[in-house]
Image (cartoon, rainbow, N blue to C red):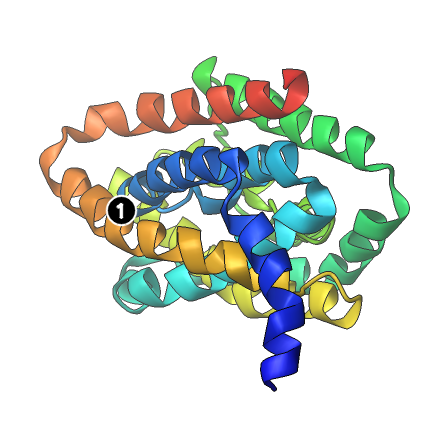
């Protein structure tokens, strides 16, 4: 066993003692506050930034593992506040299409995929900032369609948020309901989303070394965001969320 650790130790140190880790720590702190405050942000912020720092095949698995662990903090309370009639079909459809997206993660060129992540974040962020609102109902077929698209994105980029965020935040519900819906949707797909990278060999000792550094930062920053949600006026909820989306998208697209 000591021989194995001796062989792995240089790889672990190289992953952790790197200038890019500082950028990952800062991004994780922002994402944690965003997740606690808005109910989303882990994937939407960290997928483009981690992909820029480490590449999509190395960065996305770190983000997925962190998303899985952080969901445990927020899901129990949100379950009682969410509209499960809408969220459960969204999550179920995403589970079905996620394997196709995981295949795309391996098949597509990394540079193309990274810029695609940034473009998706920007398009959906600016759509919400424009003031557009979805005025229709939420029939089952539409819930399944949006969830299916989100699953494809989750498998390919680790980021299911943009279509679901656009769909849910565009409604007239109060911020409390928006936040709970997003938390439960991400909780539904968190466990399944990590299976593809595990099966395809994208998770290794470097992944866990990076996770060991950024995960404590996330656990500390999420409660800060939760506290801010109860203190900061709710009229600032949507502008804050969309500004963060725009910054993260620009980093991946032009970085």
Residue lying furthest right in this view? 107
Q: Which residue is mark 1?
A: 221
**In this view of the protein, can residue 199 be seen by the observer?**
yes
Answer with left or right where residue 131 lies relative to residue 146.
left
Badge 1 element: helix
Q: Nearer the viewer, residue 193 or 20?
A: 20
**Is residue 167 shown to the viewer in this render?**
no
Q: In the image, is 202 to the left or to the right of 54?
A: right
At x 44% / y 17%, what residue is drawn? 129
Q: Nearer the viewer, residue 97 or 35?
A: 35
Residue 208 or 48: which is nearer the viewer? 208
**How many numbered discs?**
1
> Which quadrant holds residue 212?
bottom left
Q: Residue at x 87, y 41 (%)?
A: 108
x and y percentages locating residue 207 in the rendered image: 60, 59
* Image vertical order of residue 177 relative to residue 244, above or below: below
As drawn, 129 above or below 39: above
Q: Position of residue 55 (x, y in %)?
A: 70, 39
Outermost residue toward the left in this view: 231
How many C-alpha atoms fall within 10 Å of the one at disc 1: few (<14), some, or many (≥20)?
Answer: many
Q: Residue furthest toward the top? A: 130
Q: Going 78% across and 62% down the picture, which residue do you hit?
A: 99
Viewer-nearest residue: 212 or 62:
212
Horizontal side, residue 240 vs residue 139: left or right: left
Q: Give coordinates of residue 10: x percent, y percent.
A: 61, 58
Q: Tell me the quarter of the image containing the N terminus.
A: bottom right
User: Which part of the image, by quadrant, shows the C terminus?
Assistant: top right
């Amino acid at each position: 066993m000591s021989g194995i650790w001796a062989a792995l130790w240089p790889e672990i140190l190289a992953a952790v003692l790197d200038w890019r880790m500082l950028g990952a720590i800062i991004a994780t702190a922002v994402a944690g506050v965003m997740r606690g405050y808005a109910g989303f942000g882990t994937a939407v912020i960290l997928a483009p930034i981690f992909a820029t720092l480490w590449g999509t095949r190395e960065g996305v698995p770190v983000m997925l593992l962190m998303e899985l662990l952080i969901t445990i903090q927020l899901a129990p309370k949100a379950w009682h506040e969410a509209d499960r009639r809408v969220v459960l079909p969204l999550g179920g459809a995403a589970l079905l299409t996620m394997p196709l997206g995981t295949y795309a993660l391996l098949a597509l060129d990394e540079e193309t995929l990274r810029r695609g992540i940034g473009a998706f974040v920007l398009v959906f962020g600016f759509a919400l900032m424009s003031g557009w609102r979805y005025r229709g109902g939420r029939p089952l077929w539409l819930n399944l369609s949006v969830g299916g698209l989100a699953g494809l994105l989750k498998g390919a980029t680790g980021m299911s948020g943009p279509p679901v965020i656009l769909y849910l935040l565009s409604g007239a519900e109060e911020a409390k309901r928006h936040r709970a819906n997003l938390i439960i949707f991400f909780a539904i797909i968190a466990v399944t989303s990590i299976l593809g990278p595990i099966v395809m060999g994208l998770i290794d000792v470097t992944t866990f070394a990076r996770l060991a550094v950024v995960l404590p930062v996330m656990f500390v920053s999420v409660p800060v965001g939760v506290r801010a949600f109860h203190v900061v006026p709710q009229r600032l909820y949507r502008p804050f969320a969309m500004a963060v989306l725009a910054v993260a998208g620009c980093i991946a697209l032009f970085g």
